[in-house]
Amino acid sequence: MLNIQILPVGELQANCYIITKDGSTTIIDPGAEFEKIITITDSLHITDILITHHHEDHIGALQ
């Protein structure tokens, strides 16, 4: 089953997508608020992080 969560993050409320399927999780555009993202993903097996483009509001929490 595919599970998609949309999480608005940062001052611009850019969407961070958290997609889980078959026990693997992909994060798309972790723009800000690392603590908010990790709270949701801490117990998940993150296999990929995708960045759609290199603006700060899409990469801010990449670290």
Image (tube, rainbow, N blue to C red):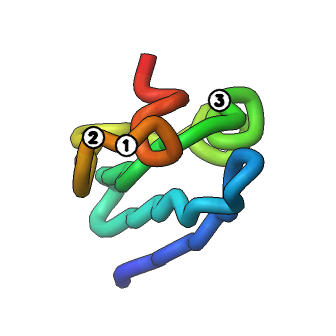
Query: Which amino acid, by three-letter code, is at mark 3?
Result: Phe
Query: Whole-Å distance between the Cαs marked 1 and 2?
Result: 4 Å
Task: Name the foreground residue: 44 vs 8.
Answer: 8
Estimate the x, y position of residue 19 in percent, counting from the top left.
Answer: 40, 65
Which quadrant does the C terminus fall into? top left
The residue carrying pointer 3 sits among few (fewer than 14), some (14 to 19) or many (20 or more) residues within 10 Å by Cα, namely some
The residue carrying pointer 2 sits among few (fewer than 14), some (14 to 19) or many (20 or more) residues within 10 Å by Cα, namely few
Query: Whole-Å distance between the Cαs marked 3 and 2?
Result: 17 Å
Task: Name the foreground residue: 6 vs 58.
Answer: 58
The reply to whether callout 1 and callout 2 are in contact (CB within 8 Å) is yes
Q: Write down the quadrant of residue 2 in the picture.
A: bottom left
Which quadrant does the N terminus fall into? bottom left
User: Image point 69% across, 52% down: which residue?
Assistant: 9
User: Image point 68% across, 47% down: which residue?
Assistant: 40
Q: Nearer the viewer, mark 3 or mark 2?
A: 2
Q: Write down the quadrant of residue 54 in the picture.
A: top left
Mark 1 residue element? loop
> Sequence order check: which comes first, mark 1 or mark 3?
3
Query: Which amino acid, by three-letter code, is at mark 1?
Result: His
Residue 34's tag is 3
